[in-house]
Amino acid sequence: MTRRLLTEDHRIFQQAARKFAEERIAPFHDQWEKDGQVPKSVWREAGEAGFLCCTVPEEYGGPGADFLYSAIFCEEIARVGATGPAFHLHSEIVAPYLMHYGTEEQKKKWLPKLVSGEVIAAVAMTEPGAGSDLQNIRTTAIRDGDDLVVNGQKVFISNGQIADLVVLACKTDPEAKGKGVSLLLMEGDRAGFERGRNLEKIGYKAQDTSELFFNDVRVPYSNILGEEGKGFYQLMEQLAQERLVIAIRSVAVIEAALEWTVAYTSERKAFGRSIADFQNTQFKLAEIKSQAVMLRYFVDRCLEDHLKGELDAVTAAMAKLQTTEILMQVLDECVQLHGGYGYMWEYPIARAWTDNRMTRIAGGSSEIMKQIIGKDLLKNS
């Protein structure tokens, strides 16, 4: 389908992003999966090519482009089945926290380095006892003179092993629930900041995911991001874009899975004819194509709204819910159409099926999305 949303400049960027994904990411992904992380040099390469932090203004070293460029790069990385480089987390989740809430000094110090890939960023919210319930996190940052003293731990932190800068959600007032949450910039080399093991996951094997520990880590109070006590609200404000990014990636994977499956079923023979010649196969592929087109139109509309600053949290939750739920249904059908080969790790459909199960959990589980949508529905009834 022709995407009317894309201008000629967007299409030129898309071609460059696709070439980068196919030539500089896909051929090396197998090794990164064995290593359990992506080399830092790949981030610098992406930065030099202009693919990181597309929306960062020129005054801070970025290209100052619209969010659609960011979306295109996310799509092209997802299309080649690459789950190792968490570029989207760095560029579309962490960088916006700095752009929206950072002081001028913080922006000038960090944003150019994020754009170039010299610094790799992560965000640390989840704890062993607090996933979606961010109001009840236990990591504390207690003021002591001009410093904050940080104690606690985080888990499931993407880029945790290689991050040079972490946006840390912590309690500056442990008794105040949501109003006690603040965001803090934590440099990766501070004394008392320790990285635990690189967690062994069933998918996303090339992306390092870590436990982080903070033992009396002293951080200047000036490292607070935005206002003290406003962290919970800052996190909520940025979740719509995070969920849109997940939806964008999910649709791209659905489209890729359809291409892989059409190619496989057209070549694979059974009972003297290709699998694609069977009516059941054609019906299944027709269903997937219809779902892919429907979701593409919806997500592109969400993108249009987001470009105008009009994407609301409930619509973003709908996009995240539907794309990830349908994604897993589609991948399961595509694995089935591949037969035994669909269960082999060397086939991209097997990796996609394993990797993308986490999309229904990350960024707020499907159950949380339903709760957001349901509450809004009842509120307006």
Image (spheres, rainbow, N blue to C red):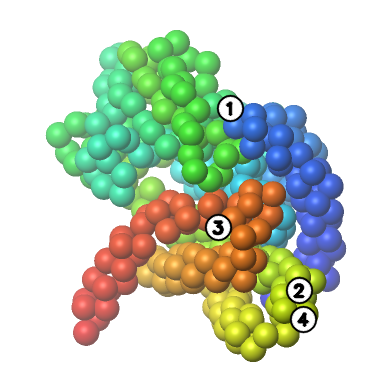
Residue at the image point whose x is 29% and y is 29% from the top: 139
**Cβ atoms under marks 4 and 2 closer than 8 Å:** yes
Q: CA distance from mark 1 to mark 4?
A: 50 Å
Vertical comparison of 48 with 266: above or below: above
Q: Secondary structure at mark 1?
A: loop
Foreground label between 2 and 1? 2
Q: Is residue 31 left or right of residue 335?
A: right
Residue 376 visible to the viewer: yes
**Cβ atoms under marks 1 and 4 closer than 8 Å:** no
Q: Which residue is mark 1?
A: 162
Foreground label between 3 and 2? 2
Instruction: Identify the mark nearer the N-term, 1 or 3.
Output: 1
Q: Is residue 128 left or right of residue 54?
A: left
Q: Which mark is residue 353?
A: 3
Instruction: Identify the mark nearer the N-term, 2 or 1.
Output: 1
Q: CA distance from mark 4 to mark 2?
A: 5 Å
- The foreground one among 110 and 153 is 153
Q: Amino acid at mark 1?
A: Ile
Q: Amino acid at mark 2?
A: Lys
- Tell me residue 290's x, y (percent): 60, 84
Q: Which residue is mark 2?
A: 269
Q: Amino acid at mark 3?
A: Trp
Foreground label between 1 and 4? 4
Q: Secondary structure at mark 2?
A: strand
**Cβ atoms under marks 3 and 2 closer than 8 Å:** no
Q: CA distance from mark 1 to mark 3?
A: 26 Å
- Counting labels gives 4
Residue at the image point whose x is 81% and y is 67% from the top: 11
Q: CA distance from mark 3 to mark 2?
A: 23 Å
Q: CA distance from mark 3 to mark 4?
A: 27 Å
Q: Secondary structure at mark 3?
A: helix
Check disc 1: other Cα within 10 Å, few if <14, some if 14-19, many if 20+. Answer: many
